[in-house]
């Protein structure tokens, strides 16, 4: 079962279970190569190697940005995605210790356009748990370009009334600020030093470079025990 922001209440038999909330892109799944390929095609770079190391999306013209988002937020280059180091193994171990999984992503799912099928295929391909509406759930934005932090706040506010949200993991500072309002332990995943600086410039949260470090932070917190 896959939920979206407009779905009804979650199954009552999940009550009493604790949950880990995690983003997908550049948190659980490394989508940096998809990002680079989309930038190269949108901006007209001859290759990924031609993209300057300090390149920022805001350097693109409006037409180029629109093209980038069309490319990045499509299923065309998802074959370039790989799991973040340790994510498959650690998520499995955390589930064995009693944490359910809530995928809370800025990817979109609507009648007009959707990344639901591609997302489910990616989760299955890498060996992540598939949403079942019981101890594994997936929430996706109902509109592609709607603000992700607003969407996540609305979903978490609803879930927090009936579920025990224990841990939240994300790579976006604004989304982490939202998550920190609803979970006792928010963890920032930073696949680069630049992302780590962006997160720490906005809030104080533990930073992990991979999911082995996420696991270590959770264990040290006393949230769960091995």
Image (cartoon, rainbow, N blue to C red):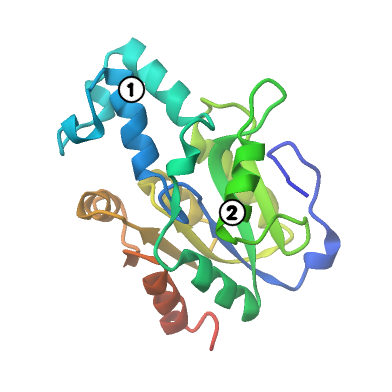
> How many numbered callouts?
2
Q: Kindly state the secondary structure of the residue where label 1 is placed.
A: helix
Seen from the viewer's position, the closer of residues 136 and 127 is 127
Question: In 3D space, how far apart are the residues under numbered discs 2 and 1 (Cα atoms)?
Answer: 26 Å
At horizontal 73% and vertical 45% (from top left) the residue drawn is 3
Can you say whether 158 is above or below 21 in the image? above
- Residue 201 position, x and y percent, is 24, 51
Say left or right for 177 vs 62: right
- Residue 195 position, x and y percent, is 27, 50
Say left or right for 92 vs 5: left
Dividing the picture into quadrants, the one containing residue 102 is: bottom right
Dots 2, 1 in contact, CB < 8 A: no
Circle 1 sits on which residue? Answer: 41
Q: Kindly state the secondary structure of the residue where label 2 is placed.
A: helix
User: Which residue extends farthest right?
Assistant: 12
Q: Earlier in the sequence, mark 2 or mark 1?
A: 1
At horizontal 31% and vertical 64% (from top left) the residue drawn is 209
Dividing the picture into quadrants, the one containing residue 141 is: top right
- Residue 68 position, x and y percent, is 38, 23
Q: Assess disc 1: are there few (<14), some (14-19) or many (≥20) residues with their C-alpha within 10 Å of its C-alpha.
A: some
- Residue 204 position, x and y percent, is 31, 61
Seen from the viewer's position, the closer of residues 138 and 218 is 138
Can you say whether 39 is above or below 153 in the image? above
Say left or right for 214 vs 23: left
User: Which residue extends farthest top?
Assistant: 63
User: Which residue extends farthest bottom?
Assistant: 226
At horizontal 44% and vertical 80% (from top left) the residue drawn is 221
Name the disc covering residue 53, or none: none
Name the disc covering residue 125, or none: 2
Can you say whether 165 is above or below 59 in the image? below
At horizontal 40% and vertical 79% (from top left) the residue drawn is 216
Q: Assess disc 2: are there few (<14), some (14-19) or many (≥20) residues with their C-alpha within 10 Å of its C-alpha.
A: few
């Amino acid at each position: 079962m896959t939920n979206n922001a407009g779905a009804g209440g979650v199954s009552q038999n999940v009550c009493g279970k604790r949950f880990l909330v995690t983003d997908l892109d550049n948190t659980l799944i490394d989508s940096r190569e998809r990002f680079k390929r989309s930038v190269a095609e949108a901006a007209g770079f001859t290759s990924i190697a031609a993209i300057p190391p300090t390149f920022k999306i805001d350097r693109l013209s409006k037409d180029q940005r629109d093209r980038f988002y069309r490319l990045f937020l499509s299923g065309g280059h998802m074959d370039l995605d790989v799991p973040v180091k340790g994510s498959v193994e650690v998520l499995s171990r955390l589930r064995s210790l009693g944490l359910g999984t809530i995928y809370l992503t800025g990817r979109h799912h609507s009648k007009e356009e959707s990344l639901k099928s591609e997302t489910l295929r990616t989760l299955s391909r890498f060996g992540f748990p598939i949403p079942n509406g019981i101890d594994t759930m997936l929430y996706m934005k109902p509109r592609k370009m709607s603000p992700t932090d607003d969407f996540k706040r609305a979903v978490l506010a609803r879930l927090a009334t009936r579920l025990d949200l224990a841990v939240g993991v994300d790579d976006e500072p604004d989304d982490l600020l939202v998550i920190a309002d609803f979970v006792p332990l928010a963890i920032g995943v930073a696949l680069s030093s630049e992302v780590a600086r962006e997160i720490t410039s906005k809030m104080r949260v533990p930073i992990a470079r991979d999911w082995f470090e996420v696991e270590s932070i959770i264990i040290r917190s006393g949230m769960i025990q091995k």
